[in-house]
Amino acid sequence: MSSELEQGREAWDRRSWRSAHAALTAARSAEPLDALDLWRLALASYLIGREDDFLRALEGAHQAYLDGGEPGPALRCATWLGLHLANRGDVARATGWFGRATRLLGELEPDCAERGYALLPEGHRQIVLGDYEAASRTAAEAAAAGQRFGDRDLFTLALHMQGRALLRLGRVEEGLSLLDEAMVAVAADDLSPLVTGLVYCAVIGACREVFAVGRAQEWTAALTEWCAAQPDMVAYTGQCRVYRAEILRRRGAWRDAIEEARRACERFIETAGPRAAGAAHYQQGEAHRLLGEFSAAEGAYRAASRAGNEPQPGLALLRLAQGDGPAAAAAIRRALAETPDRHRRARLLPAHIEVMLAVGDVDRARASCAELEEIAGGCAPGIIDTMVAEARGAIALAEGDAEGALAPLRRAWREWRDLDAPYEAARARVLLGLACRALGDEEGAALELDAAREELERLGANPAVAGMSAATGGSGRAEHGLTPRERDVIALVATGRTNRRIAEALSISEKTVARHLSNIYGKLGISSRAAATAFAYEHELLDPPT
């Protein structure tokens, strides 16, 4: 055995994927590798993002198994090749490899694990076609084969496929139960890395689809740890960062979300090309929009669109924040019109309700609320029910039923708070304050609105603070009385610049900038840069000197 081959096998065993790839590649250039070592090379190549090397090595392993008279492992290689090619949209080649796998069945025993593997492409096809009943039966048959023959990879793959099919059938409790069972095997780390990463990402995606947020967050944390334990690994890490960016955004850590999404973009571009980075660009756009960084948000949404990712509902909400209600309404209506999938519609409907209420179309908002409530019956209880409660309260308030708005809005605020979603909780509290005011309870309104404003300012949610002031009839503060230089300073603060950068822009010292800021704080009755930024948005003091 060559030293390179021995080093490659040792590196593979300790999950040092780059070293394994380098050593096994060197060994292959010196002498032919056997089928198992070609499989090792294929997997190492895949995990470090070398897709062409992965395909070549896996094709080589398939042929080596055939040459060695081992049709079972050859069938598994053909199945993996077909599934990978199908997932990247190379349907013709995928079909060819699935055909090879099917022909090999004739050389196998009537009952064997490989027959379970051969069922996986059919289950995948049935899910794509929307035949979820058939997909559930196919996956269950494959899982039974995996269980009979003690094949943990097959059993876990089939179990997660069946769980996904059941979720699509609206059998949420059953589906999530199967996904949880699959994740027990994944968490035990006794599967091949290829199956582990695939099932992690698929299960998290399925949980997100049915709004099982708690599970999605739990498994994202586990995936993050698994990826971190293998520093060489490139595969799966981009998607993991997208999931983390979404969680950080929901928790109000918007700068961290932007950075995590940026890293995801880099990883996708490194491994799968720019088109794979659409979801990461979208998460960047969402965080920039909430911070009031509209130009950056627009750029991120456009990048998402170029990558083939629908930039809605974020882009419609951006137009609403920019004051262009008609454009927002047209965009969100268009997105809904071309989205037949129920779960994807559920991600658009809350924004549609918000936009319709903003443009005064209460009837359409009410219809969307009814649809959202109906879809919620086929999702995991929790966050989608909170969305429905908030929508009901907002619609009741728009219809002049402030008393009827109180209970659903109070529920929404409490549940958003318990879900660790501070931005959504603060917005629900704004609506609560407006309902209190409509009922003549000015003291109650002040308590709710002041708490909401404080939280939004803490988050740096400048457009929301500005919109709150417009909705409540102003901030209640006196006219600013700022000098021209103080207006220059506050405009630059609103762009996120530090005192040093402001000093450079205005050709003054940092000490002078600090004095101007102290004067601004005193005049406006505020005590933070976030509050100053919010004030600049409210009073249109956003044009820094050129």
Image: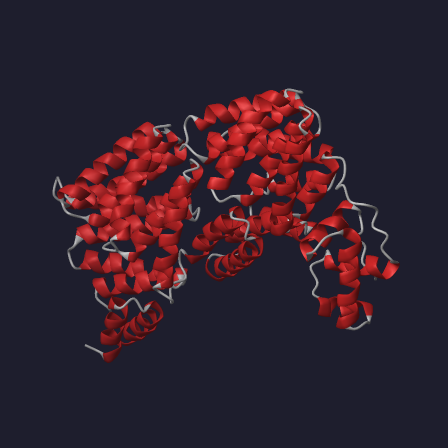
Q: What x and y, as percent, mark residue 493? A: 73, 59
Q: Residue at x 44, y 38 (%)?
A: 209
Q: Does 127 sit left or right of 433 as displayed?
A: left
Report which quarter residue 353 is drawn in. Answer: top right
Quadrant location of the C terminus?
A: bottom right
Report which quarter residue 59 is drawn in. Answer: bottom left
Would residue 74 be visible to someone looking at this image?
A: yes
Q: How many callouts does the rendering have?
A: 0
Quadrant location of the N terminus?
A: bottom left
Q: Nearer the viewer, residue 541 or 20?
A: 541
Q: Residue at x 15, y 56 (%)?
A: 69
The answer to whether residue 131 is above or below residue 80 is above
Q: Nearer the viewer, residue 403 or 315?
A: 403
Q: Residue at x 53, y 22 (%)?
A: 370
The answer to whether residue 514 is above or below residue 367 is below
Q: Does 204 sit left or right of 156 as displayed?
A: right
Would residue 32 be visible to someone looking at this image?
A: no
Q: What x and y, as percent, mark residue 284? A: 58, 52
Residue lying farthest to the front in this orientation: 443
